[in-house]
Image (cartoon, rainbow, N blue to C red):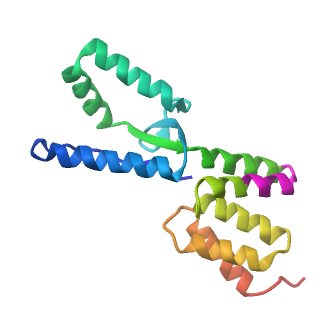
Amino acid sequence: MPNETWRWQIDPDKLDDALGDLGERARRLVSEGRYTKVRLKYRGKPIVPDIPLAALVAAEGLSLALAGPLRLLVVNLGMKAFIDVELVHEADEKVREGQEHFAVGEVDAAEAAYKQALAMKAEDPGALYHLGVLYRVTGRRDDAVRCFEKVAATDHPDAPRAKEALERMSRGPRTL
C-alpha cells in the first residue's frame, strides 16, 4: 500500500515558502484522516517495525532540546539522505485487517473493514481494489467493475491488476 512519503528540501532564500508548504501538507494530511505510524525504509524496505507517530515526534523534540537545532538539522538531513520516512495511514491498517478476514473466509468482516478504510480515506485505491476482488468473488459484478475502474485510473501498484481483472471480466465467465 503506498502511503504518504515526501522529501523536504530547504532553500534558505525561500524558508517562509517551505514552512508554509509543510503547514499546508500537514493540514491536508489531517483532513484526509489519521496517520498513526511512521515506517522507516532503506532502499524501499522497512528497517524497523512501524513506530507510533507520537513516539517519533517526542524523540525529535527531545533531540532538539538536548542536542540543539544545528546538530538536529545535520543529523536529520544526513539520515534523510538514505532513509525514507513514510507515514502510515490508519486506513491501511483496516485494509490489512480486511485482507486477513478475507483470507480465512470471513467475507462480511472483510467487506466491513474495507468500507471502514474507505470512510477514513475516500477513494483509497488499495481498499477499492480489495473490495473489488471481494465483490467479484461474491458475484456482485457491477460493484466490482466500479471499484476496479477507479483503481485502474490511478498510478497505484494495484492498477495493473485492476486493469487485468477488468479485461478478464469483459470476456465473460469462463467455460469448462
Q: Residue at x 26, y 31 (%)?
A: 78
64 over 127 or under it: above or below: above
In the image, taking residue 118 as reference, residue 48 lies left or right, namely left
The segment highlighted magenta reads: 104-113
Q: At which x and y percent is residue 56? A: 45, 27
> Is residue 7 something one can see in this rendering?
no
In the image, taking residue 160 as reference, residue 167 lies left or right, namely right
162 over 176 or under it: above or below: above
Q: Residue at x 81, y 49 (%)?
A: 101
Q: Nearer the viewer, residue 51 or 34?
A: 34
Residue 20 is a magenta residue? no
Residue 112 is a magenta residue? yes
Q: At which x and y percent is residue 31? A: 49, 51
Q: Main secondary structure of the magenta part?
A: helix
Q: Residue at x 29, y 37 (%)?
A: 81
> Is residue 125 something one can see in this rendering?
yes
Q: At which x and y percent is residue 84? A: 39, 40
Residue reaching furthest to the top: 66
Q: Residue at x 61, y 76 (%)?
A: 149
